[in-house]
Every structure is written in C-alpha cells, then in structure tokens.
Image (cartoon, grey):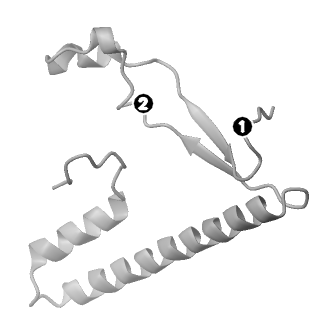
C-alpha cells in the first residue's frame, strides 16, 4: 500500500519480485532466486542513482566543463484539467491532456531554455 502523499511511481520490477516472494513464502526454494534477483536489481538502481548524483554535482561545480541533462517524462495519468475532473471512472479520462509533457533538467545552469 502506498503512503499517503506519495506521488512517485513505484518500480514495477521491485513490486513484481516482492509480490512473488510474498506469495511463495519463506520456505519455498524459488524464493532464494527471486530474493537474489531483487537484491541485484536494487544494487543496479542504486548504482544509477550514485552516477546521477555524481554527474549532478560535477555539473553544478564545473559549469563551463560539464553539462548534465536529465530527461524527465511526465506521467500524464496524473495530469488532468481541473474543471473536467469527475468522480465517474468511465469519463475521468476525458479530462486528461492528450499530449506528452517532457522536461529537461540542467543542474547548476539556472532556468535557461535550451533548444
């Protein structure tokens, strides 16, 4: 269950592996395989997070030598026009934007527009 106020999407790989582990129980021989896969996946994700942090720091400290651009594609399932929000699930999708929003973050380079 998601925490109240949690707006970030969960990792589908982590969630599916955790689901398999909880369904099989601790006594299953397959659980060790799924737990190993989960640990490897989490370590892989942590290595990318560390790389991102290193690039972010370098981009902020060495603005003339390094530019770190982060591509952030927005989840448009959570973007809706306020006036068109309704309680009915069948027509709730009508209030969603029909475009894809993407932002680019350049750490340490201010609010500039890059094209």
For label 2, the crowd category at 10 Å Cα-Cα, with few meaning under 14, some 14 to 19 and many 20 or more, is few
Q: CA distance from mark 2 to mark 1?
A: 23 Å
For mark 1, give the secondary structure: loop
Name the disc covering residue 76, or none: 2
Q: Is residue 6 above or below residue 78?
A: below
Q: Earlier in the sequence, mark 2 or mark 1?
A: 2
Quadrant position of the N terminus in the picture: bottom left
Left or right: 70 as drawn, with respect to 89: right
- Taking the image as shown, residue 77 lies to the left or right of residue 87, namely right
Pointer 2 with pointer 1, Cβ within 8 A: no
Q: Is residue 15 left or right of residue 60?
A: left
What residue is rendered at 20% in x and 54% in y?
A: 3
On the image, which quarter does residue 22 sit in? bottom left
Q: Which residue is mark 1?
A: 111
- Relative depth, front residue between 78 and 39: 78
* Residue located at (62% from left, 67% from top): 53
Of 93 and 87, nearer the camera is: 87
Q: Residue 78: where, in percent of width, then height?
A: 35, 31
As drawn, which residue projects farthest toward the top?
Answer: 83
Residue 43 pos. (x, y %): 46, 80
Q: Residue 18: image x %, image y %?
A: 23, 71
Say which residue appears at 10% left-offset and 72% top-offset: 23
Image height of 107 relative to 80, above or below: below
Q: Nearer the viewer, residue 95 or 36?
A: 95
Which corner quadrant holds the C terminus? top right
Expressed as whole percent of the image width and height from the top left, the position of residue 85 reads: 25, 15
Q: Depth check: 9 or 17 in front?
A: 9
């Amino acid at each position: 269950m998601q925490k109240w106020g949690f707006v970030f999407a969960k990792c589908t790989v982590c969630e599916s592996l955790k689901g398999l582990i909880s369904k099989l129980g601790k006594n299953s021989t397959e659980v060790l395989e799924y737990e190993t896969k989960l640990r490897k996946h989490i370590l892989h994700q942590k290595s990318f997070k560390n790389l991102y942090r290193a690039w972010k720091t370098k981009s902020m400290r060495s603005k003339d030598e390094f530019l770190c651009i982060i591509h952030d594609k927005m989840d448009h399932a959570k973007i809706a026009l306020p006036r068109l929000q309704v309680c009915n699930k069948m027509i709730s999708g009508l209030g969603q934007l029909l475009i894809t929003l993407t932002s680019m973050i350049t750490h340490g380079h201010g609010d500039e527009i890059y094209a």
